[in-house]
Image (cartoon, rainbow, N blue to C red):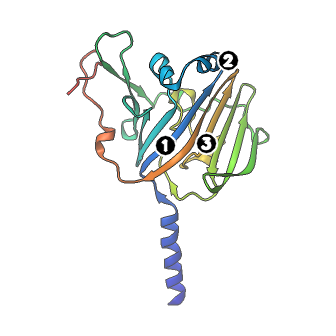
Amino acid sequence: MRTVFILCLTFIYALESYAQFEGELLYKFNVSSKLIDSLKRGMADSELREATEYFDSLRVFIKGNDYAVWKNNKTDEKNILIQRNNRIYTIAKVILSRKKERILLATDLTNSVYNKDNFTAYNTDAITISDVDFFSKKCKQYVLKDPAITETFIVADEQDYTTDINKNYLVPPYTGHNLNSPHYTPFRNRIIYYYQLDFNGFSYSFTLIDIKAQKLPESIFIIPLTDKKGIIKEP
């Protein structure tokens, strides 16, 4: 009887340790290139955001298989992935419009271009793994290199939560970051603590700064109604 009790406690602890995550992740975003660095030297972040759509923070909301991404806390600049529809919806401001209009774009994720591994040159020798401390946790850092691109992922050795997300929610789907690829096995269904992409003198990174496990309202994942041109009907 005592053995059964201990096994039950172990099972319950395992469920709590690897609970399904629902809530919000907050990331600090940084981008660097010769052009962008020259702009950043002469302008404040607030000015950059206004003039160039530059953003420096990212909020990611995860609920089941779905996620929503907001830039700089702006509800008029966000992506929503609805897994059951196999669509990612992009809400954006209409460029060069005198009105404050927003447009809704839908990307069909069943298209093969969004389900391939763009980094076929990766192999076991091209992946470097090291131990790092991050977010007050023992983590693993994975550096993946091919002839053109270097990617860096950091995930915790033992995460408190798992997810059902098989896409890299930090980057748009057209870059081919399909976490079902064998190259991304260590990050599948994991919360990404740090991500960096280096390509042809251009670099950007996302650093996790806060995790909020909480119930999310369904309103975050509602797709707005549009007219025939895709312009969102404002309430």
Mark 2 vs 3, N-terminal side = 2
Across and down, in percent, residue 122 comes to: 72, 35
Relative to residue 208, is residue 173 depicted above or below?
A: above
Quadrant in the picture for residue 125: top right
* Residue in view at x 72 percent, y 25 percent: 148
Q: Nearer the viewer, residue 224 or 32?
A: 32
User: Dot 2 corresponds to which residue?
Assistant: 34
Is residue 182 visible to the viewer in this orientation of the structure?
A: no
Q: Which mark is residue 101?
A: none
User: Dot 1 corresponds to which residue?
Assistant: 26
* Residue in view at x 60 percent, y 27 percent: 31
* Residue in view at x 61 percent, y 42 percent: 194
Judge from the rendering whether residue 83 lies leftward or rightward of residue 172; answer left or right: left
Crowding at dot 2, Cα within 10 Å, few <14 / some 14-19 / many 20+, comes out as few
Mark 1 vs 2, N-terminal side = 1
Q: Nearer the viewer, residue 60 or 175?
A: 60
- Whether the residues at callouts 1 and 2 have beta carbons within 8 Å, the answer is no
Judge from the rendering whether residue 161 lies leftward or rightward of residue 227; answer left or right: right
